[in-house]
Every structure is written in structure tokens, then in C-alpha cells.
Image: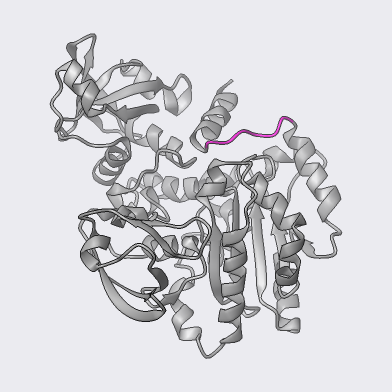
Amino acid sequence: MKASLLIALFLAAAHAESVKDREGAVRGEKARMENDARWNWNDIDGGFRLAKTTGRPLLVVLRCVPCLSCAGIDASVLQEPELVPLLDQFVCVRVINANTLDLSRFQFDYDLSFSAVMFNGDGTIYGRYGSWLHQKDPLNKTTASFKKALEAVLAVHGGYPANKAALSGKQGAPTPYQTPIEFPKLAAKYQSKLDWDGKVVASCVHCHMVGDAFRAHYRGQNKPVPVEWIYPQPSIETLGITLAADDIARVEAVAAGSPAAKAGVQTGDAFISLNGQPLVSTADVSWVLHRSPDAGALSAMIRRNGMESGITLDLPAGWRLKSDIGKRAGTWPMRAMAFGGMKMDDIPDEERAVLGLDKDQMALRIFHVGQWGEHAKAKQAGFQKDDILIEAGDLRQRITESGIIGHLLLHHLPGEKLPAAVLRGGKRVELKLPQQ
């Protein structure tokens, strides 16, 4: 029952549904793809060897087969005739599990069920691709952004190795373990090879588990979770920019008063580079932000009306905390860490007026309270569905669920029980908020 609940919570968080026959989907994938003429199936090392000998760039697609998220673009990448001339210029590798990924090379948005990392044969990363648009809509088959990413990578490859210095920021950061199955959270359950003679899906490390393992690594050492792992691969929307979904990094909208507006960014601008790194997709933008400081200046090159110019974006203190992580699969374990397995939403102004709540105070309605395991700690502490959280530790001001998760994980450690207050039926109830 517990495992079934957690799977259901993950699917709800990821805005996805799983295929009905998960085992059949994975085994069918193996039958179709392991001898495919184009795709080197689950053979990353072989892909690197071939990229070295042929001089072609390497495209590694990582796909969670049982998940329906990104199913549309995944099918298009495998079948769309218009992509063939581009794919022919790459060595193509398809990976369906994360058990033995080399984490020094494969650092990307682990909450996506379809991602791609593009390399030179020597291991240098050219760029990353991932799409939250496709993640949220399994029927979306459009490949415009993927095509442009491949074209951009081919251009970068054409300039290699003269441009290698500009690619240094795209390379992975040091990690505590080389592969996912070395993390204590995963080592006890998973092996390097999938169990094709047994329950293969249960033997597979899914990409979102990698992010979970990083967070558990810090929490297990009684340390705060680093802010970049609470808000991983942030969208540039945190700085007030909406990028077009069908392009590399073209500005579709700029929020008034935002850091982007203050820097002079305009609708129609196209970001060419960020922090000196050439961009091939919006995932590259998120990677730069993932590795950016918590405050400071961020340089960029933009193209406007055919002319290129440099600008500087200011990263205000606390900019990451504006990220909305509510739909991420990796947020469910953080909800257990931060407040014992609840899910909550900020109450909008019009409803606050009816309830007599100030627009600047904390008012988070709890609409889910977990029932099993670490997700049941809030229930055991007395929290109930439809309670309105108005105080948590030293927090009283208005805050989003994403914001309170970050604050609690950054400033409190497992075992603490924070004084908290909720409104229940209009009456104040004092409780203790469990930290795990």
C-alpha cells in the first residue's frame, strides 16, 4: 500500500500518468530498440567510442519509458522523418535507466522523463535539452525546439576545439558519488544491471531518484540541503523572462519591474550566450542558473534586430526562492522532510478577504496529508486536511509552498519540531511541525 501511494503521489506531482503495463512497456522497448540501426541502446561507452572514431558529436537521450510524460516528443524523435538528416550527423544513444550513469558527465534536470545531453567524443559537453512543456503534456509531439538544439550543437561541434574554453561552464560539478547506485539511499536496493529475469521496472533507478538521493545525502549527514538542490535547474521566469517554447532562448515576454526588465531585456530578444556559455536550448539556460551564485551579476549576449550586444542581469538575493517547484517529482520527498508529508497552497486574495485573513500573512491551505511512512508524520502530529497554516517556526509572512520548503530545509534539521499554528474551523490550533 505504501509503495502504491508514493507512486501515485509522484505521478500527480509530475502531471503524468504511467502506462498500464509498466513491465510490458520496458520489455517492449528492449525488443524494439536493442538492435536498432540508429540508436545505440543503453550503451553509453560504445557511443563515446564511436563518436571518437567517426568525429561525430554524441547525442544521449535519457527516457523513462513507463512514464507517459514526454511520450509525444519521444515518439517524434524516434519516428519523425524530418529529424533524420540531423540525427544522421550524430552518434545516437538511448538510455532507459539511471543506475550506472556517470554523474560527472550526466548532470541535467532529473525531474524530466525525457532529456538529452550532447557531447564531443572526448567527453566535453556541448549542451543539454529538456522541455517542461512536453513534460506537462504527453500528447505534445512538436520537435521545433529539439531540432534547433541539434542544429545549435552541430554549429558548436563545427567550432570545436577552438571554442572549448567557452564550454568549460557546461561541464559537470564534483559529486559525492560517481554513480547513482553508490548513494546509500539507492545502494541497498539497486544493482548496476536491470533484472530482466525478474521485475525489471523495480530494478530501475529513475532519473528523479538521482535528485532525491542528492538531497537525502545532505539530510542524512544532518546538513542543510544546498539551495541549488531545493530549486534545481531553475527557470529564467524567476528573473521575469518567459522564453518561447519553439526556440532556443527567444524572449516571449518580460515581467514589469523584474530583474530582466531592469536589465533592459525586451520581447523578441534572443539570448545567444549566458555567463559566457553558448546556448542550445532552454535547458542550457536552466543549467547556467543552476550553477549561478545566490546573488550577483550574470552576463549575457543577446541578439536584437540582427545586432548582438552584451547585457548584465542582476541576481537579487533570494532569487531562487521564487522558483515554483510544486509540480516536480522531487518535491514530494522534500515535503516529507520539511513538513511531514503535506501538500498546501497559498490562499488567494479574494478568498482571504472572505476568511478575514490579511493579504500579507501566511495562509497556506493544506489539501493533502500523507497516510503512510515518512509522509504520515504531519498526520501523527495532528495536522488535518483543510487546516490553514498561519505560523511555522519563525515564519509569519505570506509565502508560497515552494518558498516555505526552501526556508525550512535551509534553516532546520531532521528531528526538530517547530512550533506551528493552523486555523481549523476558524479557531487557532497550536501544533508541532516535524522535520525529517
Q: Is residue 269 left or right of residue 84?
A: left
Q: Position of residue 428 (x, y in %)?
A: 17, 14
Specify the principal SS of the magenta part: loop
The residue most toward the front is 305
Q: Is residue 349 left or right of residue 222?
A: left
Q: Position of residue 332 (x, y in %)?
A: 45, 35
Residue 219 vs 45, above or below: the answer is above
Q: Nearer the viewer, residue 248 or 8?
A: 248
**Which residue is drawn at the image coordinates 58% and 27% (left, top)?**
3
Asked if residue 43 can be seen in this view, the reply is no
Q: Which residues are magenta?
A: 15-20
Q: Nearer the viewer, residue 181 or 65?
A: 65
- Which quadrant, please, contains the N terminus? top right
Residue 277 vs 224, above or below: the answer is below
Q: Nearer the viewer, residue 424 or 260?
A: 260
**Which residue is drawn at the image coordinates 41% and 53% (left, top)?**
232
